Amino acid sequence: MQNGQTAFDCCICYKFANDIVGCHDCGLLYCKACIVGFCTPNPISCISCDKQRIGVLEQTLMEEYVTLQKTQQPQIQTKANQKMEIEIQKIEKQQQTPQKVNYNMGLCKNSILCQGYANPIFKDDKVCSPECLIYLTIETLPLQKIRIAILDIEKRLKFQNSVITPAASFQFDLKGRNIQTSEKAVFLKEDEYSFKTVMASQGFNSGIHYWEIKIDKDTKNEMKIGVSTNKNIDLNTAFSDYPSGFAYYTVGQFRNGSNSNGYKYGVSFKNTGVVGVYLNMNLGQLYFSYEGMNLGKAAEHASLKTGPVFPAVALLHQAGFEYQSLQPPTNFFN
């Protein structure tokens, strides 16, 4: 530990923490006023792991803190540049930058070093990433202003990560054999027992999207609900048989790249209820809900960031549903 530092320094102001609180997930410590001020008006969450589990320290650690507090004098931390790399790593975890290159944006202002292209999310700054934004921002700043500048950028990116794309409609217009579709309904009825896929031909390329699947009461078999990053598959099979397919199989499993193996996920049902599908392409995450109950994160994958990502459902024998695009419930899937 460097001279002047303690194990109880605040991760925001870098001083010995006053009225100390900590993250119960990753262990970072803060002054209570610092973390409240940094997060307001958003919910109080850790700036590293983003979990909303900030609270008092456990008894043994608190006793050590109180003992040290009696001898510790507040010290001004002047080594913000040594913390810069840690702050950048925090921002990377929170960033929602789509990875798809948009050459129309031109070169990043820092392209001499990064050789990258400007990203649409940083269109006003004309940079490719948080690292380049930070580098160009602090390059000429005096040392005492660097930490404040980094925290301002981090706060801005955290706000952007909460922005939801307006509901975008789509149609299930790619379909396997014997699947019947109308404007907002899909149904399969046949004698054979093999999955058939229905998929949207227009995929999402960025942002946060949410839609609901209302199961038809005449459904006799479970279905697979989710997304695919490839629309050029055999639609007379289940889209989740392929590595590009991510599906909640309503027997209570999650499937990806297999027609026989998956891990336990969600609840089991057949012909009742509404399934919510939440796709966060900023973070490459996929969630599901059933009858308003959040089933948790089903998948996190780089391919879910870049697009296009196509809504898809696989049906078996006799099954159907209605569907609609909606705004996601606020903070429900975060």
Image (cartoon, grey):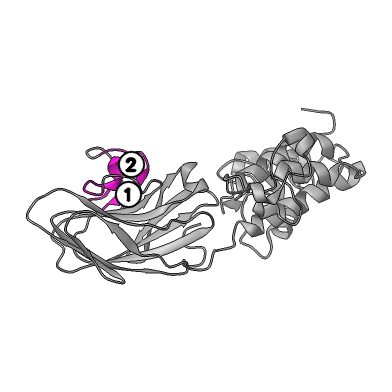
Residue 224: x %, y % from top left = 26, 52
- Badge 1: few (under 14), some or many (20 or more) residues near its Cα, within 10 Å? many
Q: Nearer the viewer, residue 283 or 114?
A: 114
Q: Which residues are magenta?
A: 235-258
- Look at the image and tell me in which quarter the N terminus lies: top right
Residue for badge 1: 247
Residue for badge 2: 256
Residue 241 lies in the magenta stretch = yes
In the image, residue 113 sits, relative to residue 183, either above or below, namely above
Q: Picture quarter containing residue 115?
A: top right
Which SS class for mark 2? loop
Say if mark 1 contacts mark 2, CB within 8 Å.
yes
Residue 134: x %, y % from top left = 77, 44
Is residue 312 toward the left or the right of residue 260 in the image? right
Q: Nearer the viewer, residue 210 or 70?
A: 210
Residue at the front extreme of this rendering: 104
- Badge 2: few (under 14), some or many (20 or more) residues near its Cα, within 10 Å? many
Q: Picture quarter containing residue 136?
A: top right
Instruction: Please say whether residue 65 is visible from this viewpoint.
Output: no
Residue 252 lies in the magenta stretch = yes
Q: CA distance from mark 1 to mark 2?
A: 6 Å
| Mark 1: amino acid | Ala
